[in-house]
């Protein structure tokens, strides 16, 4: 069970659209939208639905998406749906780096409208003050740009949600714990002093998308640019992560003092992820949520990456419980999807045996551990120089 920062209850609303599960990136693709259904089934099996207001399923409209995306790109996305031979990168450009990352598949347009609709409905619930915390685990697609798909993301629901929040709140903080750099959201708000973006991510060895290095503020950079990046090394686990997360986010809350917080809870920063090489436990990941929750500002929780799908489902179910402020038992209740958790003895909090990859990454951590304090100091110093 996870400590919840404080015992005060929150009004939580929750978005789930069963139509998301039918989205299929292709047989061998690593992104599996059905993981959101698995998370939902766990949430339901643990009896958490009774503690939240369920948001009405409401796909976004094309004009909702046009608040950020180029009309030409949206037309391509809409028409490209169902044409499996065509990628939707760089306005239809063929080949190139990300072609297989972002396939055009049957029902793609509908999928985009549904996950974006969830993040918009959740943002509107916070803006209308009907909830303290709003959840959409199918959102969090942080790489999508105004005119192109990137990194499995076609429509940037996060940018749309933040824009909706800006109609009501003066300053919105974005925090991204996905193992990848939140480049699309950062780029969308880099010129705005009303939105600060913070991303923690694995960095180095050409890890996608390669951006998000630590920036030294004041050296040719725009000092008003409220961008914070915390590049991490392979193998970093709970201890290394939280040596950075709490001090940095504590200072961010002080200096930026946001009226609302949007958190991308990508579960690919967990130990044993198929793509990421960080080693957060379920509790280490959830501690990020409970820490931000403890500041008691309107909080939007979104999904994101996560490629070992039973870990993803466990993670987001656990974080739904954290949002509500309810402890749940480690033994997974019997339900239709429980065979997925058999390899972990039907336990939510899984432990992994030390594989080869883990041993290699452990050596990496030893080399980089001494530099964590220096990284922290640099980020804190940058924060003190920001002119907001
Ligand atoms: C796959 O097996 O690093 C896609 C993607 C499809 C199926 C069959 C095709 C095989 C791993 C990844 C060839 C695919 C080659 N299939 C894809 C530079 C790359 C060029 C494209 O969590 N190839 C690009 C994107 C990253 C690259 C990560 C994270 C999203 C998020 C938020 C996006 N792209 C190399 C890869 C597979 C695949 C297996 C893959 N792609 C792993 N990392 C990437 O931040 C949701
Ligand atoms: Ca990140
Ligand atoms: Zn990711």
Image (cartoon, grey):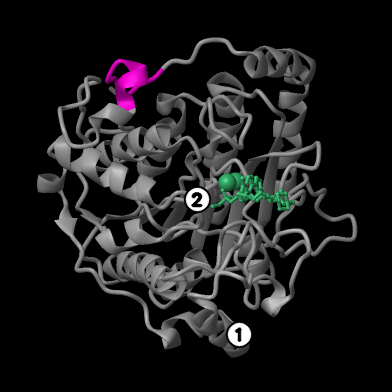
State which region is magenta: 341-350
In the rendered view, tell whether residue 69 sits above or below residue 151.
below
Query: Callout 2: 10 Å neighbours few (<14), some, many (20+)?
Result: few
Q: In the depicted view, which residue is nearer to us: 233 or 220?
A: 233
In this rendered view, identify the residue nearer to me: 53 or 312: 312
Q: Give the residue displayed 49% in from the left and 55% down from the top.
A: 257
**Residue 54's quadrant in the figure?**
bottom left
Q: Is residue 297 magenta?
A: no
Q: Is mark 2 within 8 Å of ligand 1?
A: yes
CA distance for labels 2 and 1: 30 Å
Residue located beneath label 2 in the image: 27
Query: How many residues crowd mark 1 within 10 Å: few (<14), some (14–19), many (20+)?
Result: some
Residue where numbered disc 1 is placed: 70
- The image shows residue 244 at horizontal and vertical percentages of 61, 31
Secondary structure, mark 1, is loop
- Dominant secondary structure (helix, strand or loop) of the stretch shown in magenta: loop
């Amino acid at each position: 069970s996870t400590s919840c920062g404080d015992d005060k209850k929150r009004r939580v609303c929750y978005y789930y659209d069963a139509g998301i599960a039918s989205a299929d990136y292709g047989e061998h693709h690593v992104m599996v939208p059905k993981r959101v259904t698995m998370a939902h089934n766990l949430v339901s099996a643990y009896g958490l639905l009774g503690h939240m207001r369920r948001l009405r399923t409401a796909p976004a409209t094309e004009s909702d998406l046009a608040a950020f995306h180029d009309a030409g790109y949206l037309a391509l996305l809409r028409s490209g749906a169902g044409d499996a031979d065509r990628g939707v990168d760089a306005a239809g450009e063929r080949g190139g780096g990300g072609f297989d990352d972002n396939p055009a598949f049957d029902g793609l347009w509908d999928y985009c409208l549904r996950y974006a609709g969830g993040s918009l409905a959740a943002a509107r619930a916070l803006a209308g003050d009907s909830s303290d915390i709003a959840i959409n685990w199918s959102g969090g697609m942080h790489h999508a740009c105004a005119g192109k798909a990137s990194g499995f993301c076609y429509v940037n629901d996060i940018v749309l949600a933040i824009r909706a929040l800006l109609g009501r709140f003066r300053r919105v903080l974005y925090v991204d714990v996905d193992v990848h750099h939140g480049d699309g959201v950062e780029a969308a708000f880099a010129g705005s002093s009303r939105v600060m973006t913070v991303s923690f991510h694995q960095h180095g060895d050409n890890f996608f998308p390669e951006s998000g290095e630590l920036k030294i503020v004041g050296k040719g950079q725009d000092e008003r640019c409220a961008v914070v990046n915390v590049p991490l090394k392979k193998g970093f686990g709970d201890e290394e992560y939280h040596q950075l997360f709490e001090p940095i986010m504590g200072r961010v809350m002080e200096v930026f003092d946001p009226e609302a917080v949007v958190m991308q809870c990508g579960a690919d920063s967990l130990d044993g992820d198929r793509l990421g090489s960080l080693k957060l436990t379920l509790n280490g990941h959830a501690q990020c949520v409970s820490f931000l929750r403890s500041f008691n500002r309107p909080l939007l929780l979104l999904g994101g990456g996560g490629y070992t799908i039973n870990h993803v489902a466990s993670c987001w179910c656990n974080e739904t419980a954290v949002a509500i402020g309810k402890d749940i038992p480690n033994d997974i209740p019997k339900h239709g999807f429980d065979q997925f958790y058999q390899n972990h003895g039907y336990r939510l909090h899984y432990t992994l045996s030390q594989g080869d990859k883990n041993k290699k990454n452990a050596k990496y951590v030893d080399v980089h551990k001494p530099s964590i304090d220096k990284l922290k100091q640099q980020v804190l110093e940058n924060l003190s120089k920001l002119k907001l």
